[in-house]
Amino acid sequence: MKTQRRNFLKIAAMAVLGWGVRPASELMAAGGGTASEGLLFASRHKVHAGPNTLTASRWAMVIDTAKLNEKVMEDIVHTCHSIHNVPTIPGNQNIKWIWETHMDHLFLEDLHEYQPEAGAKSALALCNHCDNPPCVRVCPTKATFQREDGIVMMDFHRCIGCRYCMAGCPYGSRSFNFMDPRKHLETTNPDFPTRTKGVVEKCEFCAERLAEGKMPACVEVSEGALAFGDLADPESEVRKLLAERFSIRRSPTLGTKPCVYYLV
Ligand code: SF4
Ligand code: SF4
Ligand code: SF4
């Protein structure tokens, strides 16, 4: 039953979210050259070529934890993972871009032992696209880098699998492909690159969708639980939510300046 639901979500995600309208490989090659050269071109620039590209000075996400429930979180995770070819691997080898976890795992500094119910609640974790990202500083090949609009990207072609970035990230937001991930994909989205053994991967704030003028997939299927926008724009939805509601970030005292905010 669960597998059927997962397959349905994968097919629905690809259809509803418009994959196939224009392949990401083609779009990313908009700067000229081959598709793989295009990947490099596209990912190293603040904005991609295209009339509908969504731009911001500083992209950020706001997660309303009160609006999250099991169904919404399952839809979000399966949608993200299916369109980005994230494999499901049994055991502790699993790869994840966004995942469900308990609040007391997310907010080590904010919860205490007298809040057992709050700590047991579930929420979502993903890369925080930190303003001061240690993963970027430690990468010896610049395979991970930060765009001007704040998105922390991966260039899979440059990754040598040293995993310094995983040691540098205090949030566990990165996954390493210890085995060939392609063997563990139930279905493959041909419009998004697959990865190989020995490469690190993570959430990229749906840079390929922003380039096409679309909001991140997780935001679209979140039933209002996730908001995404420009932190530098006082009129943006994310700024309004942050002004109206109390929010926290993951381990802010580390100085990483996460750009994923949680309304609690
Ligand atoms: S959450 Fe981790 S992987 Fe993401 S930008 Fe921050 S340090 Fe890097
Ligand atoms: S594993 Fe890849 S992305 Fe991470 S630090 Fe090494 S080369 Fe950079
Ligand atoms: S922003 Fe995109 S890549 Fe990141 S978790 Fe959401 S759907 Fe996945």
Image: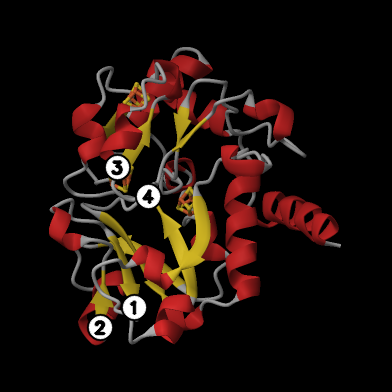
Measured as percent of width and height from the top left, residue 182 is found at: 68, 27
Q: What separation in Å lies between label 2 and label 4 (alpha carbons)? A: 21 Å
Task: Identify residue type, mark 4.
Answer: Cys
Q: Which of marks 3 and 1 is nearer the N terminus?
A: 3
Q: Residue 77 lies in what quarter of the image?
A: bottom right
Q: How is the image coloured?
A: secondary structure
Pointers 4 and 3 in contact (C-beta within 8 Å): yes
Q: Please tell me which of labels 4 and 3 falls first in the chain.
A: 4
Circles 1 and 2: CB distance less than 8 Å?
yes
Residue type for callout 3: Cys
**What label does residue 246 carry, if any?**
2
Left or right: where does residue 190 sit relative to residue 241?
A: right
Amino acid carrying mark 2 in the image? Phe
Which secondary structure, mark 1?
strand
Circle 1: residue type: Leu
Q: Does the residue labelled 4 lie within 8 Å of ligand 1?
A: yes
Q: Does the residue labelled 3 lie within 8 Å of ligand 1?
A: yes
- 3D distance between C-alphas at marks 4 and 3: 9 Å
Residue that label 3 marks: 169
What residue is at 46 percent from the left and 47 percent from the top?
A: 206
Rendered image: mark on residue 127: 4
**Residue at the location (65% across, 38% down)?**
87
Mark 3 is surrounded, within 10 Å at the Cα level, by few (under 14), some (14 to 19) or many (20 or more) other residues, namely some
- Specify which label sits upstream in the sequence, 4 or 1: 4
Q: Which of 219 and 234 is in front in this view?
A: 219
